[in-house]
Amino acid sequence: MFARKWSRRTLWIGAASLVVLLIVAVVLLRSRAGVDVAQVPFSDLLRHLDRGAVTEIVVIGDTLEFKVMSGQAFRTVAPANYVTANAAFVPDLSKKNIRIDVRSAAEPAAYSYGALVLGVGFIAVLGLTLYRVTTGRIPALESKTREADPSESTVTFADVAGVDEAKEEVKEIVDFLREPERFSAIGGRIPKGVLLVGPPGTGKTLLAKSIAGEAKVPFLFASGSDFVEMYAGVGASRIRKLFRDARRHPSCIIFIDELDAVGRSRGGNSLSHEEREQTLNQLLVEMDGFAPNQGIVVIAATNRADILDPALLRPGRFDRQVTVGTPDVKGREQILHIHAKKVALDAEVDLRQIARGTPGFSGAELANLVNEAALFAVRSGRQIVTDYDFDQARDKVLMGAERKSLTMSEHERVTCAYHESGHAVVAALLPHADPLHKVTIIPRGRALGVTMQLPEGDRHTHTREFLEAQIAILMGGRIAEELFLRQMTSGAGNDIERATEIARRMVCEFGMSAALGPLAYRTPGNPWETDKGVGISEATAQRVDDEVREVVMRGYETARQIIAKNRAAVRAMAEELLVVESLDAEGIRAVIANAA
Ligand code: ADP
Ligand code: MG
Ligand code: ZN
């Protein structure tokens, strides 16, 4: 779909000449070192001469290389001017029938000249390349922006679903791009920059493309990470080039994906900091440089608007923010419809039902789900995609692919069955937990077994009870192992990590600890990069640690009591799992009901 720009010829020529120079240098140096003769004291030469063993001498200034009868060669250094001062030396040698050869002493220096030329050449090429890169003379290095032929921009609004508010907001931009004159006649001001903000995979890139497709204008694509390079100035020159290209069109869209890669707030002292700041400044300069109604609209996407440099969000820059969120159940259904059009669906497949069972899925995950379902159908030799394929695909997307080939020892299987049953029974019996979807001891992804819950509807916030239940469920695995098998295994490591993280966030971010109150505590584990929240003293840090521990231990105690009271249910479920390997929601309910 995207036409690639001219090849990276200049760059290749530069690189090739560097390589050739290097090879020549190596060959020269080696050939010099190849005259591999032993260095011996001068007295050795005199002794060999006395014995009449020398057959050949090469005089190179004060260096004498000589061969003896056995064919061995040696090198020695004569006292200064020995050869020239000692008038009898050369005639004596010839009298002894020794072959004499004299070479100019300057000869070895020829190598140094060679090295010098090579060195200068090397530096010149390097310098020239750098110069041309930084001044943007090498198109190869800066043409990372790809231009789509407007007639080929086939993505339209119909391809984007579940983000109706966002679509509504950008419609105005489409109108403007279609008829810029009409807007300028009225004197309306169109935003120069639009920032699409939302989690990964929600369709930001797709939406930007659809704006270009709807307006039938060229779409210049660049990614923020393209601008972050090792050499200072490269990023800035790429930005210049991007806007230069854009100005060639009567109207067009510049799209900068992952704006946060360049747009992080300035300050800080990372290695590439200088370069990023230059790039960011260049972007600001370019955006200030064109008139609002010039026909260029810059669209950028990010999932971290909070870390962007405030200068980017000022009027005349990205002053319009459009939120692209994860779709709700209706949106998911529409997205599934769009992607299901590409596959042959069984008539009984109910996309609304699938949408209901996939809360929290992004557009990209839904597209992936449809694709995985189609793959399952193909693998089982079916021509159409059925409900069963969607179930399989969802489990794969949610829990990772099954790894039936992984062999577990019998003891590991038993451990895993009790561990997962512990999770499942606690989840089933706690009122504020999400309903169970599946328990399995078939290894999936990196886990040996999985207990999977699925919320009934879309969740946007969590109650304290829900989070506490979550911690208790995570503890259930370890406790079942302790109570039934009298053992602790490393298998609970990830559960413990996750439980601790939930507890930490409850205390430090959600203000859910009675002892510490509704404050945001800045702690080392906190992902915030900004300076939100209160810095804490050592004494408070101690209290935070204590409170986090307290929250986890409460969950542990809750889980321990549930499992101790329902030993029969845990045992029955573990034994069932060892036979059937997987239980769905209904199966779990049946086992627990029978054991009671
Ligand atoms: P983002 O840029 O927000 O990370 P993308 O636009 O790259 O997300 O989405 C990746 C793919 O996922 C798209 O090419 C499309 O196939 C699918 N997709 C994501 N969101 C949507 C949506 N809202 N409607 C339809 N398809 C979507
Ligand atoms: Mg994207
Ligand atoms: Zn576990």
Image: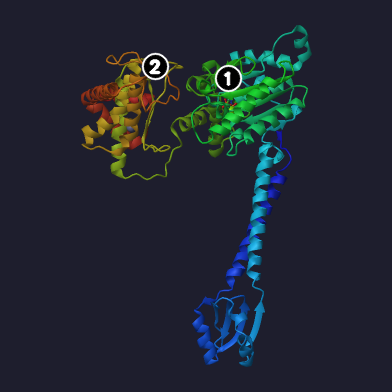
Q: Nearest the camera: 406 or 310?
A: 310
* Residue 433 visible to the viewer: no
Q: Nearest the camera: 571 or 329?
A: 329
Give the residue drawn at x 66%, y 66%: 110
Q: Nearer the viewer, mark 1 or mark 2?
A: 1
Ligand 3 in which quarter: top left
Q: Nearest the camera: 98 or 452?
A: 98
- Residue 384, position as x, y percentages in the image: 58, 31
Q: Secondary structure at mark 1?
A: helix
Image quadrant for the C terminus?
Answer: top left
Give the residue drawn at x 62%, y 79%: 59
Residue 288 to residue 236: above or below: above
Give the alpha-carbon distance from disc 1 to disc 2, as whole Å: 34 Å
Q: Which amino acid type is marked by label 2?
A: His
Q: Is residue 354 left or right of residue 440?
A: right
Q: Which amino acid type is marked by label 1?
A: Ala
- Residue 130, position as x, y percentages in the image: 65, 43
Which disc number belongs to residue 462?
2
**10 Å neighbourhood of mark 1: few (<14), some, or many (≥20)?**
some
Residue to which mark 1 is pinned: 311
Q: Nearest the camera: 442 or 147?
A: 147
